[in-house]
Image (cartoon, rainbow, N blue to C red):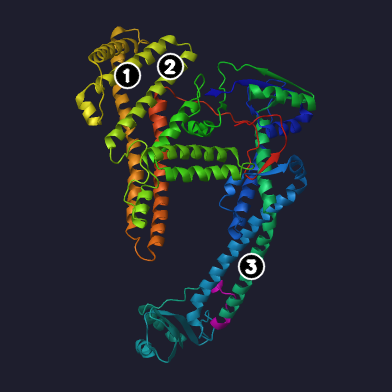
Amino acid sequence: MALLQMQRIYIYALKKDRKQILELLQRRGVVEVRSMLKEDKVFSKSDVSVAKQNLEKNISITCDSLSILNNYIKEDKSILSALAGRKELPVEEYDSFKEKYKPTVNMAKRIIELSKIIAENKAEVFRLQTQIEILTPWVNLDIPLNFKGTKFTRGFIGTLPKPWTLEEIYEKLAQYMPLDVDIISTTKEQTCIFVLCTNDKKDKVYEVLRGMEFTLPSLSIDQLPTADLSPAEQLELLVQQIDKTKSNIQAAIDEMESYDKNRNELKFLLDYDTMRLEKYEVIGSLIQSKNVFIISGFIAEKDFSAIEEELTSKFDLAVESAEPRKRDDIPVLYKNNGFSEPLEGTVNSFSPPAKGEMDPTMVMSLFYYALFGLMLSDAGYGFLIAVTCAFGLIKFRKTIEKPMKNTLKMYMFCGIATVFWGIIFSSYFGDIFDVVGKTFFGVTDLPVIPPVWFYPVEKPMLMLTFSMAIGIVHLLTGLAMKGYQLAKQKDYKGIIYDVIFWYVLLISGIVLLLSMKMVTDILGITVNISDVAVDVAGILFGASAVAIILTNGRESKQPFKRILKGLYALYGISGYLSDILSYSRLLALGLATGVIGSVINQMASMTAGGFFGPIIFTIIVILGHALNLGINALGAYVHTNRLQYVEFFGKFYEGGGKVFKPFGINTKYYKIKESTKYGNVK
């Protein structure tokens, strides 16, 4: 429940060592570089926009080439490849990549060029196939489609809608004889015809044809390979062009596939330029003179001595630290144990602690795991989650990346908590032991495994009471966290006015509610509270309410406004009541998991008869419980986060800070392997 102490760091070094110093700092990943010094006549910032644009362009090209390559040759990845983490490479391999850099960039560009060639040729094949489809009805025409006639004749080549017979066409054109009509082809949609008439009657013939809805071929003569050839000859040429285009496509695909063996070089190029881009972004924030440059930023206090020792032993430079200033936006770097560390990301999803705020991760983790387990509350499901995550952590312990490691650890602890509550309420894949025992072994002494406490389905009001009791503890803990935070700020009046008075009001209010028979009857519990305790609770409730009214508007100088603000603050007790009722979701989700699991088991037991019964039973159980686990685990995750963000954090935590983002190796595929003196930096 702590944050690491941060310091300002200043590094004064010679410009000739800039590249080596920045690469060392990048590999160490312990300094967040900030531009905290102003420019003057001697020191100024460099314009690195052109270099950054070139690197961004190369990164984009490399990403596109990898994506294109993966479209043609799928990368062989296992289901568990995400747990393997990035591949480690020695720093020497990083340094030696300079020789491969330009050829690899050219290879990436060539892959993109090949994809364009393939796309253009596929479009050409489609165009040629369209021409073939249009030409096919004219294949029996032994003259070119652009034939217009001779010196004394006029030819018309085109289509008529719907089927026409030769007699019907001659009947329409009979008065303009002599002429010749040929039907080239006929379909349900159209009739392709060739009409030849004398020049003196061409206008009249064309007018009649137009009345018959005559249209010229939809294929432009300019699109044909050679306009003076017959359609059959045109088709032959088009087929040859398609074959040639397809061979070009295949050649491009073959060349594309040949680059599969260079996929790792492309991946390294992406990471290499990503690292260089980050380095240039840092260079752009540095102030430098002709021979000297200055790095400023933040570093964890625990890492300062080691980085100072390493830098001064390798370079001629000076390193100094300083306490952060009041106006500094100090980055947040957590310090938690292995139990609560996995939930740092959950806190960040809400917002990192602001300046002066405490880290809520440790206290939150105690409730987070417990509430998740209570919502899922099935020992079988919890066992599967815990064992699966533990297997991943053990199997890939040497290669797994920290974010994935924390995710697995979080779900492993959630699974363990789920097992605990499942045992308490005797839920093992619903009531699978009872159903199997009764269905296949004739067991009558049920339940096979009784609950340690009770069945929530049988006593829902007791479960509701228990859920709200946990909610009260959760909310009071949040209020206590506020008191602790005020104590660190030495705001002792705030502790009394904003914490202690509310504690007295809430606890005395709970005592008064539990003294009412109507309330205890609804909750299904029996509570014996003496009259003296009730009287004392009533007095304390009234006194604390008056105290809240008088003190919660204390920042206002006008008495009337102060009282109004105090009354509004007292109205906040209704918010506490609604918050407590929010914990009824513990009952709802817990019951949903158990009831759905039991329904699945009952459905499976109906098919258990006969030779194939056990097989069908097993299939239904596996599929049904897999679905139930997925749905309710997701619900438990979402609602556990909600209870932390809204009910718990709402009592003391605002956030608004910034996570520590050191200058480091934020790559996708590779990481540099190098022994260091530094601990893990998150």
Q: Earlier in the sequence, mark 3 or mark 2?
A: 3
Residue type for callout 3:
Gln
Could you say whether the residue bearing mark 3 is in a helix, strand or loop? Answer: helix
The tag on residue 207 is none
**Residue with the mark numbered 3:** 250
Disc 3 versus disc 2: nearer the observer: 2
The tag earlier along the polypeptide, 1 or 2, is 2
Tell me how far mark 1 sits from mark 2, CA to CA.
Answer: 16 Å
Label 3 vs 1, first from the N-terminus: 3
Q: From the viewer's perspective, is the residue at label 1 or at label 2 nearer? A: 1
Above or below: residue 557 compared with residue 645? above
Q: Amino acid at mark 2?
A: Gly
For the residues labelled 3 and 1, the Cα–Cα distance comes to: 79 Å
Tell whether position 231 is magenta: yes
Which amino acid lies under the numbered mark 1 shown in the image of this protein?
A: Ile
Residue 284 spot, x, y in % from top left: 66, 31
Residue designated by label 2? 483
Q: Position of residue 572 (x, y in %)?
A: 31, 21
Q: Please indicate, yes or no, whether residue 72 appears anywhere in the rendered image.
A: yes
User: What residue is disc 1 on?
Assistant: 507
Question: Is residue 164 within the magenta segment?
Answer: no
Which x, y percent locates residue 272? 69, 43
Kind of element beneath mark 2: helix
Q: State whether residue 142 is above or below residue 630.
A: below
Q: Which residues are magenta?
A: 221-233
Q: Residues within 10 Å of mark 3 (few under 14, many from 20)?
A: few
- Outermost residue on the bottom side: it is 178
